[in-house]
């Protein structure tokens, strides 16, 4: 893990109508790290993800990935540059099979155009890595939440992503599934040399797994550092009044 | 593991049926049926071409008849103005329809769902009004008359039968190959969730445009054939809402998610509407068409194929996997290096 | 020239009325009600039929017609639309449009079968009367119709903003889930809204019957106009509907005077398409 910044978000502002969703967010993601993003509801975490992936265009500020400026690019261009995401409410391609779901990003990669048959094989490999190979031909909407989250993970891998943005990936999972999920993430991160940015509310996981943590509140960054540093920060405690972590 | 309908086997069955149909004119079957068969073939091709955008991509267009009309008017206007034989200008019908699709797509693709449905219908109305009001080009509401192909009634019926058959084969092959291609996968992803598809790297605008243009070009060719066979074209029948709505119904009835559905839907639709026409007469059959449409959408959203699939799919999911396989080597195709 | 424009404004108010029933249900995110204008024509026929059958003044039979239409609308909502509400969003959107389109076609054919395809109209003692004001010659019926339209729209606005049910309707279409939390029975509100929209179509039908001639084939032109008004005016905005109606009326008048009457439809279609594409939520509607 190097300390080189891979993704730099600099002073991004975005408003919807009268609401300031992002108010000068600053964030640095270093190559190879596991960055946790926490903050109260409405802090702008998902909005920030939307800006990174090009779904929303900020009013001002810049988002640089590996030297490329992202704010003027379309989402599909950004995906091909190497950024993939999962969604707070899982959004798989419901009526496509699990395998087709994973094949979509694979056939759309920039490097070396992949044929449909090759894509199928790659998808199968990825499915077995996340533990879904028995479900390859099952329609995605028939699976339970945990498996559908795995589909999203496999999709992100299929895109050949270098950075994976996880949006509350633990939400809705029971304790066993959550542990399995974080173990899987750890393994995949290492194997595919991923950099992970993870929005999460489950403190127990985030504080244990992250290399660094960034705290957002009301559209701005209020703290960043190691989990321990952030936990001791009085501003953070105030923003989170009442929130407990194990 | 592949879905059955995408196998070459399914296509082989289709081609066998086509070959059998090709022999029909040589059987004792009365010429009348050969004549009438063109209608089924036309609508099958139309439904199939519509489905490329509507079924695979999920953008239901109520303006498909615009392309039929412009295809017909292409050969019509070129004959009207320059007396060029429709036989020669036939391919241009596809070209002009394709260009129209690009223009319409440019305007309409930024809106989705039922708005797209209505917007394409509006385009259809605009086309009809233009055709009515540009007499120097289209001869206005009087329409354009086209020359007869041959004077031999039986021969002409057979020629159109084979042309219709060829067009059905063409549209079906196009649909089949799109469906199993990368484009097809992308289109289906767009249909399921366009925004997520975009963030997964799908070039959405690109793909929609291709689907629309292909769908339109095929419809244009069908329109040219229909027009030439009818020997006349005029605005109200060329750009008709009924002709736009029919392929939608056929594709939904048969099942719009693969290439077999539109064919089945077209056959059933034609058979049923002919029966209705014979038993209850013109207006009542229009009414029943409308009721049919409502019922199909309410009761059979996935079409007949959907019902068939529900019987074929095992309701019990396979065993959950026991674990994950070991890491893949770093030189495999997956890695971004 | 001025005469034509003022006529355009009068026509426009009528168009606004035609579109207001549609606009009411257009406020719902997922349903574009293409069947409402068909009910306008039904209303026209109903008023004509009832007044001829009972020999009464059209205005007197109107409440009966309105009640009948309200019931029809409620039934449509319950039988055709409610089953679709449980389907996934993206399908429901389109399927409801298709179903309502089918309904409109069905209504049109029923009208042909019941009343024949001829053009009809209501003729009263004052049908051909012309009023002269300030150098303008304006048909009396159009003035009356405009007045009716005005009154109806104002009443609608008052109903939506001042009564409990009206506010419940607005709340449901602003945010369905929150409305449910506020103990509003959204399914019943849906039925009431649709019935109301259909009843308004009935008033529009009365106006149409008095002012224009109509036939079953009128369903399509009125659908386009109603649609234009609802879309241009904006989702669920009564004021927007009114302004949009005037706009359409003026555009129509303007085009028919300057270019030719044939191109008016083209102008309206194009305007509608433009608004649809550029700002689907309409002039005064909330952003989509």
Image: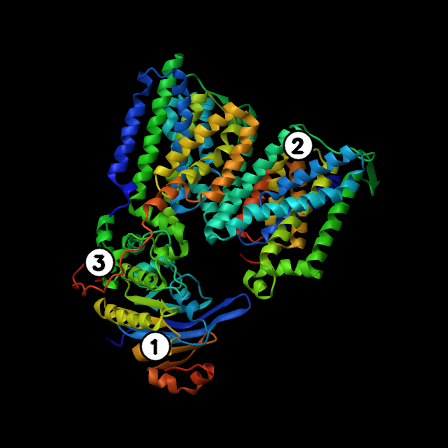
Read off the residue under disc 2: C215
- Label 3 packing within 10 angstroms: few (<14), some (14-19), many (20+): many
The residue shown at (53%, 36%) is B290
- Of residues C68 and A20, the one nearer the viewer is C68
Residue A59 position within the rendered picture, expressed as x and y whole percent measured from the top left = 47, 66
Residue C72 position within the rendered picture, expressed as x and y whole percent measured from the top left = 64, 44
Q: Where's the C terminus of chain B, which quadrant?
A: bottom left
- Of residues B28 and B113, the one nearer the viewer is B28
- Of residues B46 and B272, the one nearer the viewer is B272
Q: Secondary structure at mark 1?
A: helix
Read off the residue under disc 3: A125
Q: Chain of mark 2?
A: C
Q: Secondary structure at mark 3?
A: helix
Residue B149 position within the rendered picture, expressed as x and y whole percent measured from the top left = 40, 17
A2 relative to B263, above or below: below
B36 relative to C224, above or below: above
B66 relative to A138, above or below: above
The lab-note entry on whether marks 1 and 3 share a chain reads yes
Give residue B42's quadrant in the image: top left
Cα distance, mark 2 to mark 3?
A: 65 Å
Residue C164 position within the rendered picture, expressed as x and y whole percent measured from the top left = 69, 61
- Of residues C14 and C26, the one nearer the viewer is C26
The residue shown at (33%, 75%) is A35
Q: Which mark is residue A206?
A: 1
Q: Secondary structure at mark 2?
A: loop
Cα distance, mark 1 to mark 3?
A: 28 Å
In the image: residue C58, left or right of residue B308:
right
């Amino acid at each position: 893990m190097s300390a080189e910044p891979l993704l730099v978000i600099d002073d991004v502002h975005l408003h919807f109508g009268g609401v300031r969703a992002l108010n000068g967010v600053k964030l640095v993601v270093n190559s190879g790290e596991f960055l946790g993003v926490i903050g109260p509801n409405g802090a702008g975490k998902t909005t920030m993800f939307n800006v990174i992936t090009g779904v929303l265009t900020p009013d001002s500020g810049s988002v640089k990935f590996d030297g490329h400026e992202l704010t003027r690019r379309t989402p599909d261009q950004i995906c091909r540059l190497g950024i993939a995401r999962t969604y707070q409410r899982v959004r798989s391609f419901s009526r496509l099979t699990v395998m087709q779901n994973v094949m979509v990003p694979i056939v759309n990669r920039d490097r070396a155009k992949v044929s449909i048959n090759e894509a199928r094989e790659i998808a199968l490999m990825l499915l077995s890595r996340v533990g879904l190979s028995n479900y390859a031909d099952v329609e995605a909407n028939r699976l339970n939440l945990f498996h559908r989250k795995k589909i999203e993970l496999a999709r992100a891998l299929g895109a050949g992503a270098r950075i994976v943005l996880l949006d509350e990936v633990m939400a809705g999972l029971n304790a066993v599934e959550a542990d399995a999920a974080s173990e899987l993430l750890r393994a995949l991160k290492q194997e595919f040399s991923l950099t992970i940015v993870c929005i999460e509310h489950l403190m127990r996981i985030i504080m244990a797994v992250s290399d660094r943590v960034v705290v957002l509140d009301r559209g701005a960054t209020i703290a960043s550092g190691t989990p321990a540093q952030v936990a001791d920060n009085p501003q953070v405690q105030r923003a989170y009044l009442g929130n407990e972590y194990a | 593991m592949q879905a059955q309908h995408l196998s070459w086997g399914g296509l082989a069955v289709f081609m066998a049926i086509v070959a059998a149909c090709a022999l029909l004119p040589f059987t004792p079957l009365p010429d009348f049926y050969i004549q009438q068969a063109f209608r089924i073939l036309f609508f099958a091709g139309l439904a199939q071409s519509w489905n490329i955008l509507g079924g695979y991509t999920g953008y239901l267009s109520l303006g498909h008849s615009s392309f039929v009309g412009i295809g017909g008017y292409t050969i019509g206007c070129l004959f009207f103005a320059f007396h060029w034989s429709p036989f020669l200008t036939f391919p241009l019908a596809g070209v002009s329809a394709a260009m129209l699709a690009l223009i319409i797509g440019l305007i309409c693709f930024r809106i989705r769902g039922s708005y797209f449905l209505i917007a394409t219908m509006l385009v259809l109305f605009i086309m009809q009004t233009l055709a009515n009001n540009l007499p120097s080009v289209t001869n206005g509401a009087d329409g354009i008359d086209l020359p007869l192909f041959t004077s031999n009634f039986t021969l002409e019926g057979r020629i159109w039968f084979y042309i219709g058959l060829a067009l059905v084969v063409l549209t079906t092959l196009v649909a089949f190959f799109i469906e199993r291609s990368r484009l097809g996968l992308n289109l289906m992803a767009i249909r399921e969730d366009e925004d997520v598809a975009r963030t997964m790297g799908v070039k959405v605008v690109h793909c929609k445009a291709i689907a629309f243009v292909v769908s339109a070009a095929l419809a244009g060719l069908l329109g040219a054939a229909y027009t030439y066979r009818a020997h006349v074209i005029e605005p109200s029948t060329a750009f008709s809402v009924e002709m736009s709505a029919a392929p939608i119904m056929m594709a939904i009835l048969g099942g719009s998610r693969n290439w077999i559905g539109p064919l089945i839907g077209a056959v059933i639709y034609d058979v049923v509407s002919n029966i209705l026409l014979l038993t209850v007469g013109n207006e009542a059959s229009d009414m029943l068409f409308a009721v049919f449409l409502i019922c199909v959408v309410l009761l059979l959203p996935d079409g007949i194929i959907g019902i068939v699939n529900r019987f074929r799919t095992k309701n019990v999911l396979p065993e959950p996997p026991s674990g994950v396989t070991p890491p893949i080597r770093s030189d495999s195709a997956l890695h971004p290096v | 020239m001025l005469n034509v424009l003022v006529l355009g404004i009068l026509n426009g108010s009528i168009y606004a009325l035609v579109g207001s029933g549609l606009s009411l249900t257009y406020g719902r995110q997922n349903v574009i009600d293409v069947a409402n204008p068909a009910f306008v024509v039904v209303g026209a026929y109903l008023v004509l039929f009832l007044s001829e059958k009972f020999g009464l003044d059209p205005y007197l039979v109107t409440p009966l017609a309105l009640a009948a239409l309200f019931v029809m609308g409620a039934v449509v909502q319950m039988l055709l639309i409610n089953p679709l509400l449980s389907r996934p969003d993206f399908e429901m959107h389109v399927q409801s449009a298709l179903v309502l389109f089918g309904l409109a076609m069905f209504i049109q054919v029923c009208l042909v079968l019941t009343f024949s395809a001829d053009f009809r109209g209501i003729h009263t003692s004052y049908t051909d009367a012309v009023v002269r004001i300030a150098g303008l010659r304006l048909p009396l019926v159009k003035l009356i119709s405009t007045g009716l339209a005005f009154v109806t729209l104002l009443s609608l606005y008052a109903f939506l903003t001042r009564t409990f049910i009206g506010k419940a309707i607005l709340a449901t279409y602003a945010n369905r889930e929150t409305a449910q939390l506020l103990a509003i029975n959204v399914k019943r509100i849906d039925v009431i809204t649709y019935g109301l929209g259909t009843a308004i179509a009935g008033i529009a039908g009365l106006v149409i019957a008095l002012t224009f001639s109509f036939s079953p084939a009128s369903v399509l032109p009125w659908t386009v106009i109603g649609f234009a008004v609802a879309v241009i005016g904006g989702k669920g905005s009564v004021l927007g509907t009114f302004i949009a109606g005037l706009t359409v009326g003026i555009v129509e008048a303007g085009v028919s005077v300057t270019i030719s009457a044939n191109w008016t439809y083209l102008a309206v279609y194009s305007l509608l398409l433009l608004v649809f594409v550029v700002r689907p939520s309409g002039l005064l509607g909330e952003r989509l």
